[in-house]
Image (cartoon, rainbow, N blue to C red):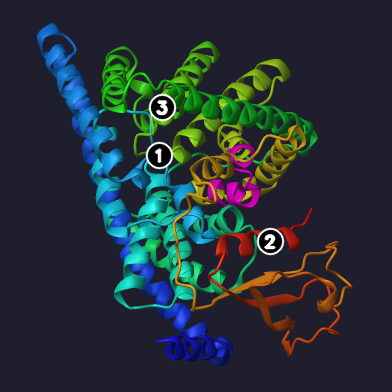
Amino acid sequence: MKEKKKINTIRKIEYKNKESFFLIIRGLEVGIVAGLVAVFYRFLLEYAEKYLNIIISTVKDSPSKIALWFIALAALGGFVAMLNKIEPMSSGSGIPQVAGEVKGVLTQNWWRVLLAKIVGGTVCVFSGLSLGREGPSVQLGGMAAKGIARATKADKTTELRMISCGAGAGMAAAFNAPLAGTMFVLEEIHHSLDKNILCMGIVSTITADYVSKLFFGQNTIFNYETVNFPLGYYWLLVLMGIVTGLCGVFYNVVMLKMQSIYKSIKKIPNYIKMPLVFVISGVVGLLLPQVLCGGHSMVALLINEHPSISMMLFLLAAKFLFGAFCFASGAPGGTLYPLCILGTYIGAVFGAVSINALGLDSSMWEEFVVIGMAGLFASIVRAPITAIILVYELTGNMNNILPLATVALISYATANLIGVQPFYETLLSNLTPSDSEKPKLFKRSEKIIKSYVIPLGSPLDGKKIKEVDWGRHSLIITVERGEESITPNGDVLLRAGDEIVFLVSQRRYAANINRLENLFATN
Protein backbone atom coordinates (compact mmCIF):
# COMPACT_ATOMS: atom_id res chain seq x y z
CA MET A 1 0.00 0.00 0.00
CA LYS A 2 2.84 2.37 0.90
CA GLU A 3 4.59 1.58 -2.41
CA LYS A 4 1.36 2.28 -4.29
CA LYS A 5 1.08 5.72 -2.65
CA LYS A 6 4.68 6.50 -3.69
CA ILE A 7 3.88 5.52 -7.28
CA ASN A 8 0.79 7.76 -7.25
CA THR A 9 2.86 10.71 -6.00
CA ILE A 10 5.55 10.15 -8.68
CA ARG A 11 2.83 9.87 -11.33
CA LYS A 12 1.43 13.25 -10.28
CA ILE A 13 4.80 14.86 -10.92
CA GLU A 14 5.37 13.08 -14.25
CA TYR A 15 1.99 14.02 -15.68
CA LYS A 16 1.80 17.56 -14.31
CA ASN A 17 2.40 19.14 -17.73
CA LYS A 18 -0.11 16.81 -19.41
CA GLU A 19 -3.01 17.26 -17.05
CA SER A 20 -4.97 20.03 -18.81
CA PHE A 21 -7.08 17.48 -20.66
CA PHE A 22 -7.93 15.64 -17.44
CA LEU A 23 -8.74 18.92 -15.69
CA ILE A 24 -11.23 19.71 -18.46
CA ILE A 25 -12.85 16.26 -18.18
CA ARG A 26 -13.09 16.60 -14.41
CA GLY A 27 -14.51 20.10 -14.84
CA LEU A 28 -17.24 18.75 -17.11
CA GLU A 29 -18.11 16.03 -14.61
CA VAL A 30 -18.26 18.49 -11.75
CA GLY A 31 -20.22 21.08 -13.72
CA ILE A 32 -22.91 18.65 -14.83
CA VAL A 33 -23.48 17.04 -11.42
CA ALA A 34 -23.09 20.20 -9.32
CA GLY A 35 -25.28 22.09 -11.78
CA LEU A 36 -28.04 19.48 -11.59
CA VAL A 37 -27.93 19.46 -7.78
CA ALA A 38 -28.07 23.27 -7.62
CA VAL A 39 -30.91 23.37 -10.16
CA PHE A 40 -32.86 20.78 -8.18
CA TYR A 41 -32.36 22.83 -5.00
CA ARG A 42 -33.40 26.01 -6.82
CA PHE A 43 -36.60 24.34 -8.05
CA LEU A 44 -37.45 23.16 -4.54
CA LEU A 45 -36.93 26.64 -3.09
CA GLU A 46 -39.03 28.32 -5.76
CA TYR A 47 -41.92 25.95 -5.07
CA ALA A 48 -41.43 26.35 -1.31
CA GLU A 49 -41.66 30.15 -1.60
CA LYS A 50 -44.67 29.87 -3.91
CA TYR A 51 -46.62 27.70 -1.47
CA LEU A 52 -45.52 29.87 1.46
CA ASN A 53 -47.19 32.87 -0.20
CA ILE A 54 -50.34 30.82 -0.82
CA ILE A 55 -50.47 29.75 2.84
CA ILE A 56 -49.95 33.30 4.13
CA SER A 57 -52.74 34.67 1.92
CA THR A 58 -55.01 31.81 3.07
CA VAL A 59 -54.46 32.06 6.83
CA LYS A 60 -53.97 35.80 7.39
CA ASP A 61 -57.66 36.60 8.00
CA SER A 62 -58.44 33.61 10.23
CA PRO A 63 -57.09 33.45 13.83
CA SER A 64 -57.68 29.70 14.01
CA LYS A 65 -55.76 29.10 10.76
CA ILE A 66 -52.96 31.37 11.98
CA ALA A 67 -52.71 29.30 15.17
CA LEU A 68 -52.48 26.08 13.15
CA TRP A 69 -49.84 27.63 10.90
CA PHE A 70 -47.75 28.68 13.91
CA ILE A 71 -47.98 25.15 15.35
CA ALA A 72 -46.81 23.77 12.01
CA LEU A 73 -43.93 26.27 11.96
CA ALA A 74 -42.87 25.26 15.47
CA ALA A 75 -42.83 21.61 14.38
CA LEU A 76 -40.76 22.49 11.30
CA GLY A 77 -38.35 24.42 13.51
CA GLY A 78 -37.94 21.39 15.75
CA PHE A 79 -37.27 19.26 12.68
CA VAL A 80 -34.54 21.64 11.47
CA ALA A 81 -32.97 21.67 14.96
CA MET A 82 -32.86 17.87 14.80
CA LEU A 83 -31.23 18.00 11.33
CA ASN A 84 -28.57 20.41 12.62
CA LYS A 85 -27.82 18.08 15.51
CA ILE A 86 -27.57 15.01 13.26
CA GLU A 87 -25.44 16.80 10.66
CA PRO A 88 -23.90 20.01 12.12
CA MET A 89 -22.09 20.80 8.86
CA SER A 90 -25.45 21.42 7.16
CA SER A 91 -26.19 24.45 9.33
CA GLY A 92 -25.65 28.04 8.25
CA SER A 93 -24.47 29.27 4.87
CA GLY A 94 -22.17 26.46 3.76
CA ILE A 95 -19.42 28.66 2.32
CA PRO A 96 -17.14 28.49 5.41
CA GLN A 97 -17.58 24.71 5.50
CA VAL A 98 -16.29 24.39 1.93
CA ALA A 99 -13.37 26.72 2.60
CA GLY A 100 -12.53 24.73 5.73
CA GLU A 101 -12.54 21.45 3.84
CA VAL A 102 -10.24 22.82 1.14
CA LYS A 103 -7.85 24.22 3.77
CA GLY A 104 -7.83 20.92 5.67
CA VAL A 105 -9.36 22.16 8.93
CA LEU A 106 -12.80 20.57 8.48
CA THR A 107 -14.19 17.42 6.95
CA GLN A 108 -17.74 16.68 5.78
CA ASN A 109 -19.73 13.56 5.00
CA TRP A 110 -20.74 14.53 1.47
CA TRP A 111 -23.99 12.57 1.12
CA ARG A 112 -25.29 13.45 4.59
CA VAL A 113 -24.58 17.13 4.03
CA LEU A 114 -26.31 16.99 0.63
CA LEU A 115 -29.46 15.45 2.08
CA ALA A 116 -29.57 17.60 5.22
CA LYS A 117 -28.85 20.85 3.39
CA ILE A 118 -31.43 20.28 0.67
CA VAL A 119 -34.16 19.24 3.10
CA GLY A 120 -33.27 21.81 5.78
CA GLY A 121 -32.87 24.68 3.32
CA THR A 122 -36.20 23.91 1.66
CA VAL A 123 -37.98 23.79 5.03
CA CYS A 124 -36.43 27.13 6.04
CA VAL A 125 -37.57 28.89 2.88
CA PHE A 126 -41.03 27.30 3.14
CA SER A 127 -41.16 28.77 6.66
CA GLY A 128 -40.16 32.24 5.42
CA LEU A 129 -36.75 32.63 7.05
CA SER A 130 -34.69 35.41 5.47
CA LEU A 131 -32.11 33.10 3.91
CA GLY A 132 -30.98 32.62 0.32
CA ARG A 133 -30.09 29.70 -1.94
CA GLU A 134 -26.66 30.86 -3.10
CA GLY A 135 -24.51 29.94 -0.07
CA PRO A 136 -26.10 26.49 0.24
CA SER A 137 -25.65 26.01 -3.52
CA VAL A 138 -21.91 26.59 -3.04
CA GLN A 139 -21.79 23.87 -0.38
CA LEU A 140 -24.06 21.52 -2.35
CA GLY A 141 -21.87 21.91 -5.43
CA GLY A 142 -18.75 21.20 -3.39
CA MET A 143 -20.24 18.11 -1.76
CA ALA A 144 -21.60 16.80 -5.06
CA ALA A 145 -18.08 17.15 -6.47
CA LYS A 146 -16.64 15.36 -3.45
CA GLY A 147 -19.07 12.53 -4.09
CA ILE A 148 -17.84 12.22 -7.69
CA ALA A 149 -14.23 12.26 -6.49
CA ARG A 150 -14.90 9.48 -3.99
CA ALA A 151 -16.89 7.43 -6.52
CA THR A 152 -14.10 7.66 -9.11
CA LYS A 153 -11.35 7.08 -6.50
CA ALA A 154 -9.63 10.39 -7.30
CA ASP A 155 -6.40 11.23 -5.49
CA LYS A 156 -6.50 13.84 -2.73
CA THR A 157 -5.15 16.68 -4.88
CA THR A 158 -7.84 16.11 -7.48
CA GLU A 159 -10.53 15.76 -4.82
CA LEU A 160 -9.70 19.12 -3.26
CA ARG A 161 -9.67 20.76 -6.68
CA MET A 162 -13.02 19.19 -7.52
CA ILE A 163 -14.56 20.38 -4.24
CA SER A 164 -13.35 23.93 -4.97
CA CYS A 165 -14.68 23.88 -8.53
CA GLY A 166 -17.93 22.25 -7.44
CA ALA A 167 -18.45 25.17 -5.07
CA GLY A 168 -17.94 27.60 -7.95
CA ALA A 169 -20.30 25.58 -10.14
CA GLY A 170 -22.97 25.72 -7.45
CA MET A 171 -22.66 29.50 -7.26
CA ALA A 172 -22.73 29.76 -11.06
CA ALA A 173 -25.96 27.75 -11.26
CA ALA A 174 -27.58 29.74 -8.44
CA PHE A 175 -26.72 33.19 -9.83
CA ASN A 176 -26.41 32.35 -13.56
CA ALA A 177 -22.92 33.79 -13.18
CA PRO A 178 -20.13 31.43 -14.34
CA LEU A 179 -17.26 33.92 -14.28
CA ALA A 180 -18.21 35.12 -10.80
CA GLY A 181 -18.37 31.50 -9.64
CA THR A 182 -14.80 30.89 -10.79
CA MET A 183 -13.49 34.15 -9.37
CA PHE A 184 -15.26 33.53 -6.05
CA VAL A 185 -13.36 30.26 -5.61
CA LEU A 186 -10.01 31.89 -6.41
CA GLU A 187 -10.59 35.11 -4.46
CA GLU A 188 -12.58 33.94 -1.45
CA ILE A 189 -11.71 30.26 -0.92
CA HIS A 190 -8.11 30.01 -2.18
CA HIS A 191 -6.97 33.66 -1.95
CA SER A 192 -4.59 32.96 -4.84
CA LEU A 193 -4.50 32.33 -8.58
CA ASP A 194 -4.05 28.61 -9.16
CA LYS A 195 -3.89 27.78 -12.89
CA ASN A 196 -5.25 24.28 -12.33
CA ILE A 197 -8.21 25.55 -10.32
CA LEU A 198 -8.79 28.21 -12.98
CA CYS A 199 -8.77 25.62 -15.78
CA MET A 200 -11.05 23.11 -14.08
CA GLY A 201 -13.13 25.87 -12.50
CA ILE A 202 -14.01 27.77 -15.65
CA VAL A 203 -15.09 24.52 -17.32
CA SER A 204 -17.22 23.47 -14.34
CA THR A 205 -18.89 26.87 -13.88
CA ILE A 206 -19.70 27.31 -17.57
CA THR A 207 -21.10 23.77 -17.68
CA ALA A 208 -23.19 24.36 -14.54
CA ASP A 209 -24.45 27.66 -15.96
CA TYR A 210 -25.45 25.87 -19.16
CA VAL A 211 -27.34 23.25 -17.13
CA SER A 212 -29.09 26.02 -15.19
CA LYS A 213 -30.07 27.90 -18.35
CA LEU A 214 -31.57 24.72 -19.82
CA PHE A 215 -34.12 24.77 -16.98
CA PHE A 216 -34.51 28.46 -16.14
CA GLY A 217 -33.83 30.22 -19.43
CA GLN A 218 -31.21 32.78 -20.39
CA ASN A 219 -32.64 35.96 -18.84
CA THR A 220 -30.47 37.86 -16.39
CA ILE A 221 -31.76 38.15 -12.82
CA PHE A 222 -31.78 41.98 -12.98
CA ASN A 223 -33.09 43.72 -16.10
CA TYR A 224 -32.89 47.50 -16.39
CA GLU A 225 -32.29 50.24 -18.93
CA THR A 226 -28.64 51.10 -19.61
CA VAL A 227 -27.52 54.61 -18.60
CA ASN A 228 -24.00 56.02 -18.87
CA PHE A 229 -22.92 57.49 -15.55
CA PRO A 230 -21.77 61.11 -16.13
CA LEU A 231 -18.01 61.46 -15.60
CA GLY A 232 -18.53 64.78 -13.85
CA TYR A 233 -20.38 63.02 -11.03
CA TYR A 234 -17.87 60.26 -10.31
CA TRP A 235 -17.14 61.95 -7.00
CA LEU A 236 -20.55 60.61 -5.97
CA LEU A 237 -19.26 57.09 -6.59
CA VAL A 238 -16.30 57.73 -4.29
CA LEU A 239 -18.72 58.83 -1.58
CA MET A 240 -20.95 55.84 -2.30
CA GLY A 241 -17.98 53.49 -1.97
CA ILE A 242 -17.23 54.90 1.47
CA VAL A 243 -20.89 54.57 2.50
CA THR A 244 -21.19 50.95 1.34
CA GLY A 245 -17.84 50.14 2.96
CA LEU A 246 -19.08 51.46 6.30
CA CYS A 247 -22.39 49.62 5.87
CA GLY A 248 -20.50 46.39 5.15
CA VAL A 249 -18.45 46.74 8.32
CA PHE A 250 -21.63 47.41 10.31
CA TYR A 251 -23.23 44.33 8.70
CA ASN A 252 -20.32 42.08 9.68
CA VAL A 253 -20.20 43.33 13.26
CA VAL A 254 -23.95 43.03 13.85
CA MET A 255 -24.37 39.64 12.14
CA LEU A 256 -21.55 38.08 14.13
CA LYS A 257 -22.70 39.70 17.36
CA MET A 258 -26.21 38.31 16.83
CA GLN A 259 -24.74 34.85 16.27
CA SER A 260 -22.68 35.18 19.44
CA ILE A 261 -25.72 36.27 21.48
CA TYR A 262 -27.81 33.38 20.15
CA LYS A 263 -25.12 30.83 21.04
CA SER A 264 -24.66 32.36 24.49
CA ILE A 265 -28.28 31.58 25.44
CA LYS A 266 -27.39 28.09 26.65
CA LYS A 267 -30.17 27.75 29.20
CA ILE A 268 -32.65 27.30 26.35
CA PRO A 269 -31.86 24.20 24.24
CA ASN A 270 -31.77 24.54 20.47
CA TYR A 271 -34.82 22.31 20.00
CA ILE A 272 -36.78 25.09 21.73
CA LYS A 273 -34.91 28.12 20.33
CA MET A 274 -35.25 27.01 16.71
CA PRO A 275 -39.07 26.57 16.84
CA LEU A 276 -39.28 30.07 18.36
CA VAL A 277 -37.30 31.43 15.41
CA PHE A 278 -39.72 29.76 13.00
CA VAL A 279 -42.79 31.09 14.84
CA ILE A 280 -41.33 34.62 14.83
CA SER A 281 -40.80 34.17 11.09
CA GLY A 282 -44.50 33.37 10.84
CA VAL A 283 -45.38 36.59 12.67
CA VAL A 284 -43.11 38.61 10.37
CA GLY A 285 -44.70 36.92 7.36
CA LEU A 286 -48.14 38.13 8.40
CA LEU A 287 -46.99 41.68 9.15
CA LEU A 288 -44.31 42.28 6.50
CA PRO A 289 -44.15 39.47 3.90
CA GLN A 290 -41.79 41.47 1.66
CA VAL A 291 -38.78 40.65 3.86
CA LEU A 292 -39.28 36.88 3.82
CA CYS A 293 -36.94 34.39 2.12
CA GLY A 294 -34.11 35.56 -0.12
CA GLY A 295 -35.62 38.89 -1.09
CA HIS A 296 -36.88 38.49 -4.66
CA SER A 297 -40.13 40.27 -3.78
CA MET A 298 -38.14 43.21 -2.41
CA VAL A 299 -36.32 43.57 -5.73
CA ALA A 300 -39.61 43.45 -7.63
CA LEU A 301 -41.06 46.10 -5.31
CA LEU A 302 -37.99 48.30 -5.75
CA ILE A 303 -37.85 48.15 -9.55
CA ASN A 304 -41.59 48.17 -10.29
CA GLU A 305 -42.94 50.60 -7.70
CA HIS A 306 -40.01 52.92 -6.85
CA PRO A 307 -40.99 53.32 -3.18
CA SER A 308 -40.30 56.48 -1.19
CA ILE A 309 -37.01 57.00 0.63
CA SER A 310 -38.66 56.45 4.00
CA MET A 311 -40.23 53.17 2.83
CA MET A 312 -36.91 51.98 1.39
CA LEU A 313 -35.14 52.76 4.67
CA PHE A 314 -37.81 50.91 6.62
CA LEU A 315 -37.61 47.81 4.40
CA LEU A 316 -33.80 47.96 4.47
CA ALA A 317 -33.74 47.99 8.28
CA ALA A 318 -36.42 45.30 8.56
CA LYS A 319 -34.68 42.98 6.08
CA PHE A 320 -31.33 43.45 7.79
CA LEU A 321 -32.59 42.82 11.32
CA PHE A 322 -34.77 39.86 10.33
CA GLY A 323 -31.92 38.41 8.25
CA ALA A 324 -29.46 38.77 11.15
CA PHE A 325 -31.95 37.06 13.46
CA CYS A 326 -32.46 34.12 11.07
CA PHE A 327 -28.73 33.79 10.36
CA ALA A 328 -27.87 33.76 14.07
CA SER A 329 -30.05 30.68 14.59
CA GLY A 330 -27.78 28.52 12.42
CA ALA A 331 -30.69 27.46 10.21
CA PRO A 332 -29.56 26.04 6.84
CA GLY A 333 -29.56 28.93 4.40
CA GLY A 334 -27.36 31.53 2.81
CA THR A 335 -26.60 35.21 3.21
CA LEU A 336 -25.17 36.00 -0.25
CA TYR A 337 -28.41 36.94 -2.01
CA PRO A 338 -29.94 38.72 1.01
CA LEU A 339 -26.80 40.87 1.30
CA CYS A 340 -27.10 41.67 -2.42
CA ILE A 341 -30.67 42.82 -1.78
CA LEU A 342 -29.49 45.03 1.08
CA GLY A 343 -26.92 46.50 -1.31
CA THR A 344 -29.59 47.36 -3.87
CA TYR A 345 -31.61 49.20 -1.21
CA ILE A 346 -28.56 51.11 0.05
CA GLY A 347 -27.84 52.08 -3.56
CA ALA A 348 -31.48 53.01 -4.11
CA VAL A 349 -31.56 55.31 -1.07
CA PHE A 350 -28.22 56.88 -1.98
CA GLY A 351 -29.38 57.37 -5.56
CA ALA A 352 -32.72 58.89 -4.58
CA VAL A 353 -31.04 61.37 -2.22
CA SER A 354 -28.43 62.28 -4.86
CA ILE A 355 -31.03 62.78 -7.60
CA ASN A 356 -33.20 64.95 -5.37
CA ALA A 357 -30.28 67.01 -4.04
CA LEU A 358 -28.34 67.50 -7.27
CA GLY A 359 -31.11 67.42 -9.86
CA LEU A 360 -29.69 64.40 -11.69
CA ASP A 361 -31.65 62.59 -14.37
CA SER A 362 -34.08 60.17 -12.69
CA SER A 363 -33.04 57.44 -15.16
CA MET A 364 -29.76 57.15 -13.21
CA TRP A 365 -31.57 55.75 -10.19
CA GLU A 366 -31.41 52.12 -11.33
CA GLU A 367 -27.69 52.57 -11.97
CA PHE A 368 -27.24 53.43 -8.29
CA VAL A 369 -29.32 50.37 -7.35
CA VAL A 370 -27.02 47.83 -9.01
CA ILE A 371 -23.81 49.65 -8.09
CA GLY A 372 -24.84 49.52 -4.42
CA MET A 373 -25.02 45.75 -4.65
CA ALA A 374 -21.38 45.53 -5.78
CA GLY A 375 -20.21 47.93 -3.09
CA LEU A 376 -21.81 46.08 -0.19
CA PHE A 377 -20.70 42.66 -1.50
CA ALA A 378 -17.09 43.87 -1.81
CA SER A 379 -16.97 45.24 1.74
CA ILE A 380 -18.66 42.28 3.44
CA VAL A 381 -17.05 39.38 1.58
CA ARG A 382 -13.83 41.30 0.84
CA ALA A 383 -13.84 40.01 -2.74
CA PRO A 384 -14.04 43.11 -5.00
CA ILE A 385 -13.29 41.41 -8.32
CA THR A 386 -16.01 38.82 -7.67
CA ALA A 387 -18.39 41.67 -6.79
CA ILE A 388 -17.72 43.50 -10.06
CA ILE A 389 -18.06 40.38 -12.22
CA LEU A 390 -21.12 39.12 -10.33
CA VAL A 391 -23.11 42.34 -10.77
CA TYR A 392 -22.10 42.50 -14.43
CA GLU A 393 -23.38 38.95 -14.97
CA LEU A 394 -26.56 39.59 -12.97
CA THR A 395 -27.38 42.61 -15.13
CA GLY A 396 -25.75 41.74 -18.45
CA ASN A 397 -24.65 45.38 -18.73
CA MET A 398 -21.07 46.21 -19.75
CA ASN A 399 -21.59 49.98 -19.61
CA ASN A 400 -21.51 50.11 -15.82
CA ILE A 401 -18.18 48.29 -15.34
CA LEU A 402 -16.25 51.48 -14.49
CA PRO A 403 -18.81 52.73 -11.91
CA LEU A 404 -19.01 49.20 -10.45
CA ALA A 405 -15.24 48.96 -10.14
CA THR A 406 -14.96 52.42 -8.60
CA VAL A 407 -17.49 51.74 -5.85
CA ALA A 408 -16.42 48.13 -5.21
CA LEU A 409 -12.73 48.95 -4.81
CA ILE A 410 -13.32 52.00 -2.59
CA SER A 411 -15.79 50.01 -0.48
CA TYR A 412 -13.25 47.18 -0.18
CA ALA A 413 -10.49 49.61 0.82
CA THR A 414 -12.74 51.32 3.38
CA ALA A 415 -13.58 48.03 5.08
CA ASN A 416 -9.92 47.01 5.11
CA LEU A 417 -8.85 50.32 6.64
CA ILE A 418 -11.31 49.88 9.50
CA GLY A 419 -9.84 46.44 10.14
CA VAL A 420 -12.90 44.23 10.59
CA GLN A 421 -12.24 40.68 9.35
CA PRO A 422 -14.03 39.42 6.20
CA PHE A 423 -17.38 37.83 6.98
CA TYR A 424 -16.81 34.26 5.80
CA GLU A 425 -13.26 34.09 7.17
CA THR A 426 -14.60 34.95 10.61
CA LEU A 427 -17.31 32.31 10.28
CA LEU A 428 -14.67 29.74 9.33
CA SER A 429 -12.49 30.61 12.33
CA ASN A 430 -15.56 30.16 14.56
CA LEU A 431 -16.18 26.73 13.01
CA THR A 432 -12.58 25.54 13.22
CA PRO A 433 -11.93 23.18 16.15
CA SER A 434 -8.94 23.63 18.43
CA ASP A 435 -5.80 21.61 17.70
CA SER A 436 -6.68 19.07 20.38
CA GLU A 437 -10.14 18.54 18.91
CA LYS A 438 -9.21 18.37 15.23
CA PRO A 439 -9.99 15.03 13.60
CA LYS A 440 -7.46 13.26 11.44
CA LEU A 441 -8.73 14.56 8.13
CA PHE A 442 -6.31 13.02 5.64
CA LYS A 443 -4.24 9.91 5.18
CA ARG A 444 -0.60 10.63 5.87
CA SER A 445 1.15 8.82 3.02
CA GLU A 446 -0.34 10.50 -0.07
CA LYS A 447 1.02 13.95 -0.96
CA ILE A 448 -1.02 16.89 -2.26
CA ILE A 449 0.13 19.22 -5.03
CA LYS A 450 -0.25 22.95 -4.30
CA SER A 451 1.02 25.90 -6.31
CA TYR A 452 1.51 29.57 -5.43
CA VAL A 453 2.58 32.62 -7.44
CA ILE A 454 5.06 35.12 -5.96
CA PRO A 455 3.34 38.53 -6.06
CA LEU A 456 5.04 41.84 -6.83
CA GLY A 457 6.59 43.33 -3.72
CA SER A 458 6.77 39.98 -1.94
CA PRO A 459 9.66 39.40 0.50
CA LEU A 460 10.29 36.19 -1.48
CA ASP A 461 11.23 38.20 -4.59
CA GLY A 462 15.03 38.10 -4.94
CA LYS A 463 15.61 35.38 -2.36
CA LYS A 464 17.20 32.00 -2.96
CA ILE A 465 15.15 28.88 -2.21
CA LYS A 466 17.54 27.88 0.58
CA GLU A 467 17.03 31.24 2.32
CA VAL A 468 13.33 30.59 3.00
CA ASP A 469 11.90 28.29 5.67
CA TRP A 470 9.19 26.44 3.71
CA GLY A 471 8.33 24.08 6.56
CA ARG A 472 9.30 20.47 7.20
CA HIS A 473 6.41 18.92 5.28
CA SER A 474 6.46 21.01 2.07
CA LEU A 475 8.75 20.05 -0.83
CA ILE A 476 9.30 22.27 -3.90
CA ILE A 477 9.10 20.12 -7.03
CA THR A 478 9.37 22.80 -9.72
CA VAL A 479 9.53 26.54 -10.31
CA GLU A 480 7.51 27.70 -13.33
CA ARG A 481 8.85 30.91 -14.91
CA GLY A 482 6.80 31.71 -17.99
CA GLU A 483 7.10 28.68 -20.26
CA GLU A 484 10.25 27.48 -18.49
CA SER A 485 10.23 24.80 -15.79
CA ILE A 486 13.19 25.19 -13.44
CA THR A 487 14.45 22.23 -11.45
CA PRO A 488 14.63 23.49 -7.88
CA ASN A 489 17.81 23.61 -5.84
CA GLY A 490 18.87 25.80 -2.95
CA ASP A 491 20.64 28.36 -5.16
CA VAL A 492 17.68 29.09 -7.50
CA LEU A 493 16.88 32.81 -7.27
CA LEU A 494 13.14 33.47 -6.99
CA ARG A 495 11.42 36.28 -8.88
CA ALA A 496 8.02 37.96 -8.76
CA GLY A 497 5.64 36.07 -11.05
CA ASP A 498 7.28 32.68 -10.46
CA GLU A 499 4.83 29.87 -9.80
CA ILE A 500 6.23 27.51 -7.18
CA VAL A 501 4.76 24.01 -7.12
CA PHE A 502 4.89 22.06 -3.86
CA LEU A 503 4.28 18.53 -2.72
CA VAL A 504 2.61 18.99 0.67
CA SER A 505 2.43 16.19 3.19
CA GLN A 506 -0.97 15.42 4.68
CA ARG A 507 0.70 15.37 8.10
CA ARG A 508 -0.35 18.72 9.61
CA TYR A 509 -1.81 19.70 6.23
CA ALA A 510 -3.81 22.69 7.53
CA ALA A 511 -0.76 24.16 9.29
CA ASN A 512 1.39 23.62 6.18
CA ILE A 513 -1.12 25.38 3.92
CA ASN A 514 -1.53 28.25 6.36
CA ARG A 515 2.25 28.69 6.47
CA LEU A 516 2.54 28.76 2.67
CA GLU A 517 -0.37 31.18 2.30
CA ASN A 518 1.30 33.56 4.76
CA LEU A 519 4.59 33.33 2.86
CA PHE A 520 2.90 34.22 -0.43
CA ALA A 521 0.55 36.86 1.00
CA THR A 522 0.67 40.27 -0.66
CA ASN A 523 0.85 42.20 2.61
Q: Is residue 99 visible?
A: yes
Q: Amino acid at mark 2?
A: Arg
Q: Amino acid at mark 1?
A: Gly
Residue ID at (48%, 91%)? 7
Mark 1 → mark 2, Cα distance in angstroms: 28 Å
- Residue receiving disc 3: 298
- Residue receiving disc 2: 515
Q: Quadrant of residue 288?
A: top left
- Could you tell which of marks 1 and 2 lies nearer the N-terminus? 1
Q: Residue furthest front?
A: 436
Q: Quadrant of residue 512?
A: bottom right
Q: Quadrant of residue 443?
A: bottom left
Closer mark to the observer between disc 1 and disc 2: 2
For the record, the magenta segment spans: 377-391
- Could you tell which of marks 1 and 3 lies nearer the N-terminus? 1
Residue ID at (55%, 46%)? 391
Picture coordinates of residue 138, whole percent (x, y): 42, 52
The label on residue 92 is 1
| The one of 215 and 410 positioned closer to us in this rendering | 410
